[in-house]
Amino acid sequence: MDIHIEQDFSDLLKDIVGEENVKLSEEMKKHITFRVGGPADYFVVPHCADEVAAVFCLCKEKEIPIYILGNGSNLLIPEEGVRGVVVKIAENMNAYSVDAETNTITAEAGVKLSKCASVACEAGLSGLEFAAGIPGTIGGGVTMNAGAYGGELSDCIVWAKVLNEDGDALTLTKKKLELGYRESIIAKKNYVVLEAAFQLENGDKDEIRAKMQDFNRRRREKQPLEYPSAGSTFKRPTGHFAGQLIEEAGMKGYTIGGAMVSEKHAGFVINKGDATAADISNLIAVVQQRVRENSGVDLEPEVKCWK
């Protein structure tokens, strides 16, 4: 669908979120961790769930595509950009609270997972240590049931408040979220996460902090954090490790343009500094093909592509 920037529509967006929170032709490479991607027709930063719902309903009424952006840590956007409205949750929707009586942390969708882990630590609550180094937000994390080092959000989530395709707010219990390995009902039905609550356990602050520091040390040692990337490029195939399969297929260090299979950890495709979205996309496809030819295993990307 071809979207052209229209002043009337832009004014309607500004009426909802304020003039300073609507940008036109915003370069998306500034907002995703791969540091690639062209401009979005409309870039909107809401303050709260009601504004998200209002923008959502406006786009539906005008038949304009809408895309929800968190911290941009698991995303690839093409050089031609995004036709429609990009709503960035991470900027303003970052409130959280701790209920000491129930050991529950409630956080808006824009709160970073690493921040939530730190808040839990300071409150002496254990269960989110695995999230200490994950760069995504609560919204993206719940959508894909983010996890690391043996832990997942499904281990501690109680409920999530979401926006459905009709713009209605729903509160879904853990069971109704249908959380699996990097999947949920949210992704399947194109819901938008607004807020979530996590039930944790009492723990020793020093022990919790030490565990988080250990996870972060292991990340620094094993992952190419010095380069732009989207984190782990592929989902873990059943019975295998993606990085090992990629290395066995001879793809470690393989490059296309400015994109490269990390020499530090083959499970990461990185931007060496001048990659395009096409370089990255093409490299992902070549890696999949080579691994399939070498081991018969089909690698499924964790990275989502907006087309």
Image (spheres, rainbow, N blue to C red):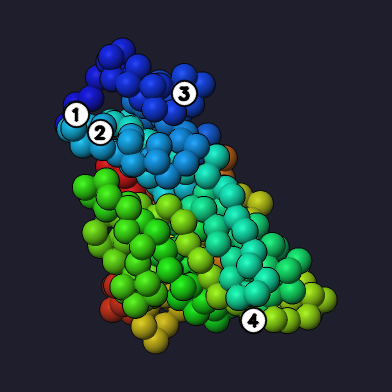
If you read the primary sequence from the N terminus, does the residue marked by circle 3 or circle 2 appear first?
3
If you read the primary sequence from the N terminus, does the residue marked by circle 3 or circle 1 appear first?
3
> Of the numbered discs in the image, which one, if any, rests on residue 59?
2
Determine whether label 3 and label 4 are within 8 Å by CB.
no
Q: Nearer the viewer, residue 213 or 18?
A: 18
The 10 Å Cα crowd at callout 3, few under 14, some 14 to 19, many 20 or more, is some
> Of the numbered discs in the image, which one, if any, rests on residue 62?
1
Marks 1 and 4: which is nearer the front? 4
Determine whether label 2 and label 4 are within 8 Å by CB.
no
Marks 3 and 1: which is nearer the front? 3
Which residue is rendered at x = 25% and y = 19% of the image?
4
What residue would you read off at disc 3? 18
Q: Tell whether 70 sits left or right of 120.
A: left
Under circle 3, the secondary element is loop
Q: Tell whether 175 sits left or right of 145.
A: left
The number of numbered discs placed on residues in the rendered structure image is 4
Can you say which quadrant of the picture contains the N terminus? top left
Which residue is rendered at x = 52% and y = 53% of the image?
108
If you read the primary sequence from the N terminus, does the residue marked by circle 3 or circle 4 appear first?
3
If you read the primary sequence from the N terminus, does the residue marked by circle 1 or circle 4 appear first?
1
Question: How far separated are the C-alphas under marks 3 and 4?
Answer: 40 Å
Determine whether label 1 and label 4 are within 8 Å by CB.
no
Under circle 4, the secondary element is strand
Q: The residue under label 4 is which amino acid type?
A: Glu
What residue would you read off at disc 4? 201
The 10 Å Cα crowd at callout 2, few under 14, some 14 to 19, many 20 or more, is some
Q: Quadrant of residue 132?
A: bottom right
Give the vertical position of 180 relative to 286 (above or below): below
If you read the primary sequence from the N terminus, does the residue marked by circle 2 or circle 4 appear first?
2
Can you say which quadrant of the picture contains the C terminus? top left
Determine whether label 2 and label 1 are within 8 Å by CB.
yes
